[in-house]
Image (spheres, rainbow, N blue to C red):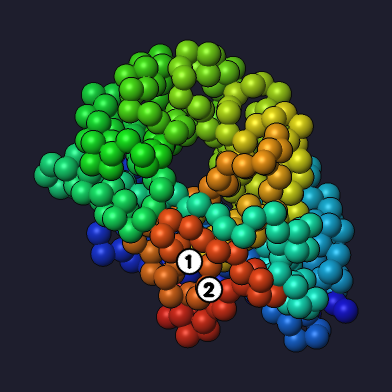
């Protein structure tokens, strides 16, 4: 059995309304996905997180090393890709390209063996996962705080038990908006904040102390991912759990993050950090350090499905009779690619997602949507 072909596609969707966060504005979605076909006719789909054109170039660079390999030997293929890029791409976009290929290989492997990916990862340890709604980005409007509160109320009405909002515009505004959102959703829904590394240490401490009273589930990327020691210091100055890691690559990057005692929660993006093969290793590393893991997820239904199968397999440390809920990020911002490219029975219902037992990653990809959104040469 061999890999016959690898095709990559850049998909783009112009947004009806631009939104922004602490770093820059989004006016469109642009994502690279990959299709891997075996000589048996089976097809697997993957996705890379990062600038789509660069991810596509990375996939094309790696393709000659993957064509002709046995698609069931995903760890062997991962090692080949890693060794072929180690000298010049230990971190960054080529690892995202590796991730896209690896995710597609797991989907392909599941379809060939007619088994769900969570089983191939080692087994489903939970049937349901709690999605947290990611939204509450900024838009150019009057009374932004009221708009954010109204959006949060809608997530609560839909049954979400947890949600995450953006901060990072400025400490005074952040405090105001967090207070409004917490008031809108009440005390029982978990609320997290994410500044996308907008602040320095002094500012992050100031904001953390100011919003502790609103029972914040975690403060995500409070400062630059380069400052491991500052993350560790921030943890000693606030009761809010500190989260980060979406900018880390491979288990080696996460080892640095964990050894420095930087975070309470690590957030590897499966489509960037090395795919499911490497995410499994990162999960083992996190268990050694006794740190929680909640994957970062952004993109199409391919990325969401990969994260769901991964979380279904996660160990919860320490073990106990009533294990805590496992969370998954569930982006709710406008995204035609997410809504139209794939369909799956893994959808949020009353604040829970039931894990599929269908072969592979458990979604169906629609070629007509692929044609609709594919960037033409």
| Image location (x, y in percent) of residue 258 | 68, 28
Q: Label 1: few (<14), some or many (≥20) within 10 Å?
A: some
Q: Name the residue located 11 percent from the left edge and 44 percent from the top edge.
A: 142
Give the SS element for disc 1: loop
Q: Name the residue located 46 percent from the left edge and 24 percent from the top edge.
A: 240
Residue, disc 2? 344
- In this view of the protein, can residue 97 be seen by the observer? no
State which quarter of the image contains the N terminus.
bottom right
| Image location (x, y in percent) of residue 326 | 57, 47
Please state the total of marks drawn on the protein image.
2
Q: Which residue is at the front of the view, 79 or 345?
A: 345
| Image location (x, y in percent) of residue 192 | 41, 37
Residue, disc 1? 347
In the displayed structure, 334 sits above or below 11; it is above
Distance between the Cα atoms at labels 1 and 2?
7 Å
Direction from residue 280 to residue 233 in the image, left or right: left
Q: Name the residue located 85 percent from the left edge and 77 percent from the top edge.
A: 2
Quarter where residue 87 is shown: top right
Quarter where residue 245 is shown: top right
Q: Label 2: few (<14), some or many (≥20) within 10 Å?
A: some
Farthest residue, direction left: 142
- In this view of the protein, can residue 105 be seen by the observer? yes
Q: Are marks 1 and 2 in contact (CB under 8 Å)?
A: yes
Residue 31 - label: none
Give the SS element for disc 2: strand
In the displayed structure, 21 sits above or below 123; it is above
């Amino acid at each position: 059995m061999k890999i016959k072909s690898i095709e990559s596609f850049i998909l783009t969707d112009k947004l009806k309304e631009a939104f922004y966060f602490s770093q820059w504005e989004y006016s469109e979605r642009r994502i690279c996905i990959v299709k891997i076909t075996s000589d048996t006719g089976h097809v697997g789909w993957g996705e890379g997180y990062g600038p789509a054109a660069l991810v596509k170039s990375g996939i094309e660079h790696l393709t000659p090393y993957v064509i002709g390999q046995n698609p069931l030997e995903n760890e062997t293929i991962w090692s080949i890709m890693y060794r072929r890029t180690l000298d010049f791409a230990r971190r960054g976009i080529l690892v995202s390209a590796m991730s896209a290929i690896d995710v597609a290989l797991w989907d392909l492997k599941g379809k060939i063996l007619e088994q769900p990916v969570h089983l191939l990862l080692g087994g489903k340890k939970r049937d349901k996962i709690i999605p947290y709604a990611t939204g509450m980005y900024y838009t150019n409007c009057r009374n932004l705080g009221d708009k954010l509160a109204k959006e949060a109320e809608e997530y609560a009405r839909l049954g979400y038990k947890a949600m995450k909002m953006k901060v990072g515009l400025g400490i005074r505004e952040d405090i105001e908006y967090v207070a409004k959102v917490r008031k809108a959703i009440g005390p029982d829904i978990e609320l997290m904040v994410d500044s996308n590394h907008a602040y320095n240490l002094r500012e992050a401490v100031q904001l953390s102390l100011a919003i502790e009273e609103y029972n914040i589930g975690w403060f995500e990327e409070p400062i630059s991912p380069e400052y491991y020691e500052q993350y560790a210091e921030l943890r000693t100055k606030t009761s809010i759990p500190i989260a980060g890691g979406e900018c880390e690559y491979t288990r080696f990057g996460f080892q640095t993050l964990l050894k420095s005692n930087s975070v309470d929660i690590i957030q590897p993006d499966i489509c960037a950090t090395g795919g499911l093969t490497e995410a499994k290793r990162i999960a083992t590393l996190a268990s050694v350090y006794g740190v929680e893991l909640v994957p970062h997820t952004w993109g199409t239904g391919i990325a969401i499905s990969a994260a769901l199968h991964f979380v279904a397999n996660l160990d919860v440390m320490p073990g106990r009779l009533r294990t805590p809920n496992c969370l998954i990020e569930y982006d709710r911002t406008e995204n035609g690619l997410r809504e139209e490219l794939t369909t799956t029975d893994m959808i949020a219902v009353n604040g829970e997602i039931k894990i599929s037992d269908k072969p592979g990653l458990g979604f169906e990809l629609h070629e007509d949507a692929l044609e609709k959104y594919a960037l033409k040469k």
